[in-house]
Amino acid sequence: MRSTSHGLFAALALIPLLAGCFASGSASDTNATTGRLRVALAVPPVQALSPYSNDATALGKLSVAEGLTALGQDGAAAPALATSWTRKDITTWVFELRKARFHDGTEVTAESVVNALDHANAAKTKPRVLSDVTLTAKAEDADTVTISTKTADPVLPLRLASPALGIFSAKAYATNGSVSPVGTATGPYKITKVTGKTQATLDRFDDYWGGKAKASGIDVTWIADGAARTNALRAHEVDIAEWIPTAQARLLDKDTRHDVPSVRADSLILNTATGIFADESLRAAARQAVDGSALVASVFGGYADPAQGLFGPAIPWAADLRIKVSGQATTAEVQSKTQGKTLRLAAYTNRAELPEAATVLQQQLEKAGFTVQQDVREYTQIEADILAGKYDALILSRVTLLDTGDAVAYLASDYMSNGVYNIARLKDPKVDQAITAAAEEGDTAQRRQKIMLAEAEILRTNAVIPLVHEKVVQGISTNVEGVLLDPRERSLINLDTRLK
């Protein structure tokens, strides 16, 4: 099976980025003459832009890093550093590389690809995209790489499009296991400077294999506060601002405000391993108490749809294939089960709607008899406690198709017993079996049906209570064109993004 797709990043639509806090006045004048884009992003780097963390998303949005493949507009794998690929047998794929250079001037070779994938496999905390698969890469010659998996992986080309599996030059990898993308990636923009968790400077990489980008560079600022991002755009201090809070959207002029249905799902994740929700009947009580539809108008200002499951309207095939959930625990005496039970509820501030959602859910849960203690902080401050299981419940905003563009990787990382992002700490053999069956299915139609079977098994456990599916609001200055509006939130700036 050989790919014949063309076009690394098809223009998806116009979408805005968020730019940081620049001094007013001179900054606005300077960027017009230099051709540099000013972008504000919402989630500050957790691990100095390491591709093995959530920071990988920024590397993709800013066109810094590339993998062997890219996720095309149609959801299929498209060529990137690999020009084509062939499936040799059920566990073996052969990739042919294009002529390309790293930002440090060295050539992209089969050996450098093997080195990058070997480091990802050996990472202390594996990228989520590798939570359900082990890759073995081998250089056949300078331009050919063979990649094998222990078991059949029908969507391996899609998996390799993950931002977490970007290919970097040898000098990116330190002996302590850390990875630095500064000056070591292959995209049209190279990182020249990172200032803590607040700013980064990117310059155009003139030796990029796909041609020169139309902007001369990108000045990135991370602004966790949604209102501050909105105000930076209104004050012309940034050209692109991502994730405009729905409460702020009405403050933007119509021609700078853009919304798109997103594969982002907001859910209440329950800790099934320790604390009160190790009791399945108390999880059932929480499910019966929570009504996500109440958030649509009150918190999201209409920029959301009530959740029917894990997958929403931006994944059009899901609704027709959805399976009725059966076997869920229920509790007729909710008040008697919940009385005196203290629930530690976490949310984070990077998405402005989540703290408001926490207040609404607290009221719903307390009405059902729970005592709720909230902990609301910026994501980088709360992530370690979340992963350590220190909360009973978390309001999580999750891009379900972020890692591979295939829903199985999301289900495996978040809900399998060995999932690397299993915040619910769920260990359920039926869930594991259902996700494994979907992962092994190569036929697209059958794979989708098995994905929805797995969804039903997950919902049966009450480990997750779907709330809403968001419509993402992006802010873009009228002096910018070519910004990508991507329902999967993986793309933002490409070769054609520029100031008018």
Image: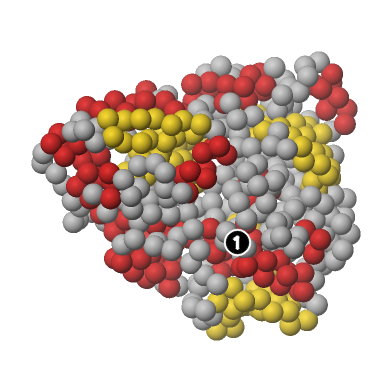
Toward the viewer: 325 or 215? 325
Toward the viewer: 189 or 211? 189
Q: Name which quarter of the figure residue 33 lies in.
A: top right
Q: Position of residue 344 (x, y in %)?
A: 36, 36
Q: Quarter of the image containing the N terminus?
A: bottom right
Q: Name which quarter of the figure residue 202 lies in.
A: top right
149 up-or-down from 301: above or below: below
Q: Quarter of the image containing the C terminus?
A: top right
Q: Is residue 316 left or right of residue 254?
A: left
Instruction: Specify the amino acid type for callout 1.
Output: Lys
Q: Name which quarter of the figure residue 306 lies in.
A: top left
The scheme the figure's colours follow is: secondary structure
Q: What residue is rendered at 81% in x and 41% in y?
A: 193
Q: What residue is rendered at 62% in x and 76% in y?
A: 136
207 up-or-down from 247: above or below: below
Q: Position of residue 248 (x, y in %)?
A: 53, 20
Q: Is residue 352 left or right of residue 256?
A: left
Which residue does the numbered mark 1 point to in the structure image? Answer: 124
**Residue 446 seen:** no
Q: Residues within 10 Å of mark 1 (few under 14, many from 20)?
A: few
Q: Is residue 23 left or right of residue 234?
A: right
Q: Position of residue 276 (x, y in %)?
A: 27, 44
Q: What residue is rendered at 67% in x and 51% in y?
A: 50
**Residue 399 seen:** yes
Toward the viewer: 272 or 194? 272
Q: How many marks?
A: 1
Q: What residue is rendered at 80% in x and 77% in y?
A: 142
Secondary element at tag 1: loop
